[in-house]
Protein backbone atom coordinates (compact mmCIF):
# COMPACT_ATOMS: atom_id res chain seq x y z
CA UNK A 1 0.00 0.00 0.00
CA UNK A 2 1.44 3.32 -1.09
CA UNK A 3 2.05 5.87 1.62
CA UNK A 4 1.56 9.51 0.75
CA UNK A 5 4.54 11.73 1.60
CA UNK A 6 3.97 14.33 4.31
CA UNK A 7 2.62 17.61 3.06
CA UNK A 8 5.05 20.51 2.94
CA UNK A 9 3.59 23.52 4.70
CA UNK A 10 4.56 27.07 3.93
CA UNK A 11 6.36 28.58 6.86
CA UNK A 12 5.24 32.01 7.98
CA UNK A 13 7.74 34.82 8.22
CA UNK A 14 6.51 35.64 11.75
CA UNK A 15 6.32 32.96 14.38
CA UNK A 16 3.01 32.14 16.06
CA UNK A 17 4.50 32.90 19.45
CA UNK A 18 4.87 36.52 18.36
CA UNK A 19 1.11 36.82 17.90
CA UNK A 20 0.51 34.75 21.02
CA UNK A 21 2.33 37.15 23.35
CA UNK A 22 -0.13 40.06 23.12
CA UNK A 23 -3.32 38.17 24.10
CA UNK A 24 -1.36 36.21 26.70
CA UNK A 25 -0.04 39.35 28.34
CA UNK A 26 -3.48 41.00 28.17
CA UNK A 27 -5.00 37.92 29.79
CA UNK A 28 -2.42 38.08 32.54
CA UNK A 29 -3.18 41.73 33.33
CA UNK A 30 -6.95 41.24 33.39
CA UNK A 31 -6.74 38.04 35.39
CA UNK A 32 -4.39 39.71 37.85
CA UNK A 33 -6.89 42.54 38.35
CA UNK A 34 -9.66 39.99 38.87
CA UNK A 35 -7.51 38.20 41.41
CA UNK A 36 -6.70 41.40 43.30
CA UNK A 37 -10.37 42.09 43.98
CA UNK A 38 -11.95 43.50 47.13
CA UNK A 39 -10.62 44.41 49.57
CA UNK A 40 -7.20 44.64 47.88
CA UNK A 41 -8.56 46.83 45.06
CA UNK A 42 -11.81 48.49 46.07
CA UNK A 43 -14.38 48.37 43.30
CA UNK A 44 -13.32 45.02 41.83
CA UNK A 45 -15.71 42.46 43.25
CA UNK A 46 -17.26 39.09 42.56
CA UNK A 47 -20.73 40.30 43.53
CA UNK A 48 -22.35 43.42 44.93
CA UNK A 49 -25.17 43.06 47.45
CA UNK A 50 -27.47 46.08 47.56
CA UNK A 51 -29.79 47.23 50.32
CA UNK A 52 -31.74 50.37 51.18
CA UNK A 53 -29.10 51.27 53.75
CA UNK A 54 -26.06 50.57 51.59
CA UNK A 55 -24.30 47.79 49.75
CA UNK A 56 -21.52 45.29 50.25
CA UNK A 57 -18.98 44.38 47.56
CA UNK A 58 -17.80 40.80 47.96
CA UNK A 59 -14.36 40.09 46.57
CA UNK A 60 -11.92 37.22 46.43
CA UNK A 61 -10.24 38.15 49.69
CA UNK A 62 -12.95 39.87 51.73
CA UNK A 63 -15.80 42.40 51.79
CA UNK A 64 -16.13 46.16 51.37
CA UNK A 65 -19.07 48.38 52.33
CA UNK A 66 -20.20 51.42 50.37
CA UNK A 67 -22.96 53.91 51.03
CA UNK A 68 -23.37 52.74 54.64
CA UNK A 69 -23.63 55.49 57.24
CA UNK A 70 -21.54 55.51 60.42
CA UNK A 71 -19.16 52.76 59.27
CA UNK A 72 -15.57 53.58 60.10
CA UNK A 73 -14.06 50.39 58.70
CA UNK A 74 -14.97 50.25 55.02
CA UNK A 75 -13.38 46.87 54.29
CA UNK A 76 -12.50 43.69 56.10
CA UNK A 77 -8.96 42.55 56.55
CA UNK A 78 -7.40 40.70 53.64
CA UNK A 79 -8.72 37.18 53.61
CA UNK A 80 -11.27 38.01 56.28
CA UNK A 81 -14.73 36.47 55.94
CA UNK A 82 -15.21 36.09 59.68
CA UNK A 83 -18.31 37.58 61.30
CA UNK A 84 -16.12 38.95 64.09
CA UNK A 85 -14.64 41.58 61.78
CA UNK A 86 -15.24 45.17 62.80
CA UNK A 87 -17.21 45.93 59.66
CA UNK A 88 -19.92 43.43 60.64
CA UNK A 89 -20.35 44.91 64.10
CA UNK A 90 -20.91 48.36 62.59
CA UNK A 91 -23.45 47.37 59.92
CA UNK A 92 -26.95 48.82 60.28
CA UNK A 93 -29.93 46.61 61.01
CA UNK A 94 -30.87 46.20 57.35
CA UNK A 95 -27.48 44.68 56.56
CA UNK A 96 -26.96 42.55 59.65
CA UNK A 97 -28.36 39.50 57.88
CA UNK A 98 -25.54 39.73 55.34
CA UNK A 99 -23.25 38.21 57.95
CA UNK A 100 -24.99 34.90 57.29
CA UNK A 101 -23.17 34.76 53.97
CA UNK A 102 -19.93 33.95 55.72
CA UNK A 103 -21.35 30.66 57.00
CA UNK A 104 -23.11 29.83 53.70
CA UNK A 105 -19.81 29.13 51.91
CA UNK A 106 -17.29 26.62 53.28
CA UNK A 107 -13.82 28.01 53.77
CA UNK A 108 -12.46 25.36 51.41
CA UNK A 109 -14.09 27.17 48.48
CA UNK A 110 -12.32 30.39 49.34
CA UNK A 111 -9.00 28.60 49.77
CA UNK A 112 -9.33 26.65 46.50
CA UNK A 113 -10.35 29.75 44.55
CA UNK A 114 -7.46 31.78 45.96
CA UNK A 115 -4.95 29.01 45.25
CA UNK A 116 -6.04 28.54 41.63
CA UNK A 117 -6.11 32.28 41.05
CA UNK A 118 -2.52 32.53 42.29
CA UNK A 119 -1.33 29.51 40.28
CA UNK A 120 -3.01 30.81 37.15
CA UNK A 121 -1.32 34.21 37.56
CA UNK A 122 2.14 32.64 37.89
CA UNK A 123 1.53 30.25 34.99
CA UNK A 124 0.17 32.85 32.59
CA UNK A 125 3.07 35.17 33.40
CA UNK A 126 5.54 32.38 32.67
CA UNK A 127 3.71 31.67 29.41
CA UNK A 128 3.98 35.30 28.33
CA UNK A 129 7.72 35.29 29.04
CA UNK A 130 8.25 31.97 27.24
CA UNK A 131 6.35 33.19 24.17
CA UNK A 132 8.85 36.05 23.97
CA UNK A 133 11.70 33.53 24.14
CA UNK A 134 10.17 31.50 21.30
CA UNK A 135 9.66 34.63 19.21
CA UNK A 136 13.27 35.67 19.78
CA UNK A 137 14.62 32.25 18.81
CA UNK A 138 12.50 32.34 15.66
CA UNK A 139 13.79 35.82 14.78
CA UNK A 140 17.39 34.67 15.27
CA UNK A 141 16.71 31.51 13.20
CA UNK A 142 17.77 29.12 15.92
CA UNK A 143 17.11 25.42 15.54
CA UNK A 144 15.11 25.33 18.81
CA UNK A 145 12.47 27.79 17.55
CA UNK A 146 9.97 25.09 16.52
CA UNK A 147 10.20 23.25 19.83
CA UNK A 148 9.87 26.51 21.76
CA UNK A 149 6.74 27.36 19.80
CA UNK A 150 5.15 24.03 20.72
CA UNK A 151 6.08 24.60 24.37
CA UNK A 152 4.60 28.10 24.34
CA UNK A 153 1.28 26.79 23.02
CA UNK A 154 1.27 23.94 25.53
CA UNK A 155 1.80 26.42 28.36
CA UNK A 156 -1.00 28.57 26.96
CA UNK A 157 -3.36 25.60 27.02
CA UNK A 158 -2.60 24.76 30.64
CA UNK A 159 -2.85 28.42 31.59
CA UNK A 160 -6.34 28.51 30.10
CA UNK A 161 -7.25 25.40 32.11
CA UNK A 162 -6.06 26.97 35.35
CA UNK A 163 -7.95 30.16 34.50
CA UNK A 164 -11.18 28.27 33.87
CA UNK A 165 -11.07 26.23 37.09
CA UNK A 166 -12.04 29.19 39.34
CA UNK A 167 -15.21 29.71 37.26
CA UNK A 168 -17.22 26.81 38.78
CA UNK A 169 -15.84 27.73 42.20
CA UNK A 170 -17.18 31.27 41.86
CA UNK A 171 -20.46 29.97 40.42
CA UNK A 172 -20.84 27.74 43.48
CA UNK A 173 -20.02 30.75 45.62
CA UNK A 174 -22.83 32.83 44.07
CA UNK A 175 -25.50 30.12 44.02
CA UNK A 176 -24.83 29.32 47.67
CA UNK A 177 -24.77 32.93 48.81
CA UNK A 178 -27.67 34.76 47.23
CA UNK A 179 -30.55 32.38 48.09
CA UNK A 180 -29.50 32.64 51.74
CA UNK A 181 -29.48 36.43 51.86
CA UNK A 182 -32.13 39.11 52.09
CA UNK A 183 -31.44 40.40 48.57
CA UNK A 184 -32.27 37.53 46.15
CA UNK A 185 -32.82 39.97 43.28
CA UNK A 186 -29.35 41.45 43.56
CA UNK A 187 -27.58 41.38 40.18
CA UNK A 188 -24.33 39.43 40.22
CA UNK A 189 -21.41 39.06 37.92
CA UNK A 190 -18.31 36.96 37.71
CA UNK A 191 -14.92 38.59 37.31
CA UNK A 192 -13.56 38.77 33.80
CA UNK A 193 -10.42 36.78 34.61
CA UNK A 194 -11.73 33.19 34.38
CA UNK A 195 -13.66 33.96 31.18
CA UNK A 196 -10.39 34.87 29.46
CA UNK A 197 -9.55 31.19 29.20
CA UNK A 198 -12.09 30.85 26.40
CA UNK A 199 -10.44 33.71 24.55
CA UNK A 200 -7.03 32.09 24.89
CA UNK A 201 -8.30 28.76 23.54
CA UNK A 202 -9.83 30.58 20.57
CA UNK A 203 -6.52 32.35 19.99
CA UNK A 204 -4.69 29.03 19.94
CA UNK A 205 -7.06 27.58 17.35
CA UNK A 206 -6.95 30.70 15.19
CA UNK A 207 -3.16 30.83 15.12
CA UNK A 208 -2.90 27.08 14.55
CA UNK A 209 -5.19 27.21 11.53
CA UNK A 210 -3.68 30.39 10.13
CA UNK A 211 -0.01 29.48 10.35
CA UNK A 212 0.27 25.73 10.58
CA UNK A 213 3.65 25.80 8.88
CA UNK A 214 5.43 26.66 12.10
CA UNK A 215 4.83 23.12 13.31
CA UNK A 216 6.19 21.45 10.15
CA UNK A 217 9.81 22.21 9.46
CA UNK A 218 10.25 21.12 5.84
CA UNK A 219 13.93 22.12 5.71
CA UNK A 220 16.68 20.22 7.56
CA UNK A 221 18.35 21.96 10.50
CA UNK A 222 21.49 23.95 9.69
CA UNK A 223 24.72 21.97 9.61
CA UNK A 224 27.71 22.77 11.73
CA UNK A 225 30.45 24.94 10.25
CA UNK A 226 32.91 22.05 10.40
CA UNK A 227 30.72 19.63 8.45
CA UNK A 228 29.99 19.59 4.75
CA UNK A 229 26.44 20.05 3.48
CA UNK A 230 24.52 16.84 2.79
CA UNK A 231 24.84 17.32 -1.01
CA UNK A 232 28.66 17.55 -0.87
CA UNK A 233 29.63 14.10 0.37
CA UNK A 234 33.02 12.65 -0.69
CA UNK A 235 32.87 10.74 -3.99
CA UNK A 236 32.14 7.03 -3.82
CA UNK A 237 34.44 4.33 -5.19
CA UNK A 238 31.83 3.46 -7.81
CA UNK A 239 32.00 6.99 -9.23
CA UNK A 240 35.78 6.56 -9.71
CA UNK A 241 35.31 3.19 -11.46
CA UNK A 242 37.20 1.50 -8.64
CA UNK A 243 35.78 -1.62 -7.09
CA UNK A 244 37.73 -1.25 -3.84
CA UNK A 245 40.03 1.27 -2.21
CA UNK A 246 43.60 1.02 -3.41
CA UNK A 247 46.32 0.00 -0.93
CA UNK A 248 48.93 2.55 -0.03
CA UNK A 249 51.81 0.61 -1.72
CA UNK A 250 49.93 0.33 -5.00
CA UNK A 251 49.28 4.09 -4.92
CA UNK A 252 53.07 4.74 -4.68
CA UNK A 253 53.85 2.32 -7.53
CA UNK A 254 51.15 3.87 -9.68
CA UNK A 255 52.54 7.34 -9.05
CA UNK A 256 56.09 6.32 -10.07
CA UNK A 257 54.85 4.52 -13.20
CA UNK A 258 52.84 7.53 -14.32
CA UNK A 259 55.80 9.82 -13.73
CA UNK A 260 58.14 7.61 -15.81
CA UNK A 261 55.56 7.31 -18.56
CA UNK A 262 55.19 11.07 -18.80
CA UNK A 263 58.99 11.43 -18.86
CA UNK A 264 59.32 8.96 -21.73
CA UNK A 265 56.68 10.74 -23.73
CA UNK A 266 58.47 14.00 -23.20
CA UNK A 267 61.76 12.49 -24.55
CA UNK A 268 60.04 11.13 -27.65
CA UNK A 269 58.66 14.57 -28.42
CA UNK A 270 62.20 15.98 -28.59
CA UNK A 271 62.36 17.59 -25.24
CA UNK A 272 65.43 16.79 -23.19
CA UNK A 273 64.81 14.91 -20.05
CA UNK A 274 65.95 17.01 -17.13
CA UNK A 275 67.28 15.05 -14.19
CA UNK A 276 65.32 15.30 -11.00
CA UNK A 277 61.87 15.75 -12.56
CA UNK A 278 60.90 12.08 -12.30
CA UNK A 279 60.80 10.80 -8.74
Image (cartoon, grey):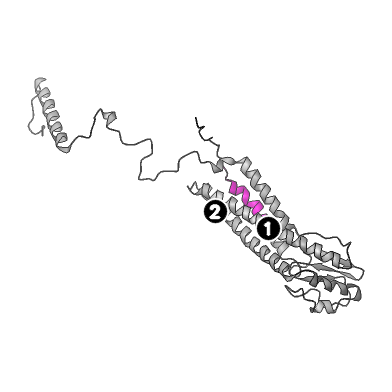
Image-quadrant location for residue 49:
bottom right
Q: Residues within 10 Å of mark 2 (few under 14, many from 20)?
A: some
Check residue 133 in the rendering and tell me which mark sits there, or answer none: 2
Give the residues drawn in magenta, as a range. Answer: 13-27
Pointer 1 with pointer 2, Cβ within 8 A: no
Residue at screen point 65% across, 54% down: 24
Q: Main secondary structure of the magenta part?
A: helix
The residue positioned farthest toward the top in the image shown: 269
Within 10 Å of disc 1 (Cα), the crowding (few <14, some 14-19, many 20+) is: many
The answer to whether residue 29 is left or right of residue 259 is right
* Residue 265 visible in this rendered orientation of the protein: yes
Which secondary structure, mark 2?
Answer: helix
Residue at image position (8%, 34%) is 276
> Percent from the top left, x then y, of residue 82?
77, 76
Residue 93 placement, left or right of 153? right
**Quarter of the image where the C terminus is located:** top left
- Is 218 a magenta residue? no
Circle nearer the N terminus (1, 2): 2
Residue 163's tag is: 1
* Image position, residue 32 (x, y; %): 69, 62
Residue appearing at x 80%, y 69% in the figure: 104
Residue 45: in sight, yes or no? no
Residue 34 image offset from top left, x and y in percent: 73, 62
Amino acid sequence: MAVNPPAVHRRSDINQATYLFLPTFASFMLFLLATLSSPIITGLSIATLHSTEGSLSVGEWGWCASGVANVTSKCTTHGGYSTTSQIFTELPTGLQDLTDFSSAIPSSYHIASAVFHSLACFLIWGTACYSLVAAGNWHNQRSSAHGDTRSAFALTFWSAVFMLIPTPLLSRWCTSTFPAGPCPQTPTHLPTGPALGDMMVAQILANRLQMGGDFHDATPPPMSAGLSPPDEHPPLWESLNLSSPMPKDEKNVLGVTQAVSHSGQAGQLGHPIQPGFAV
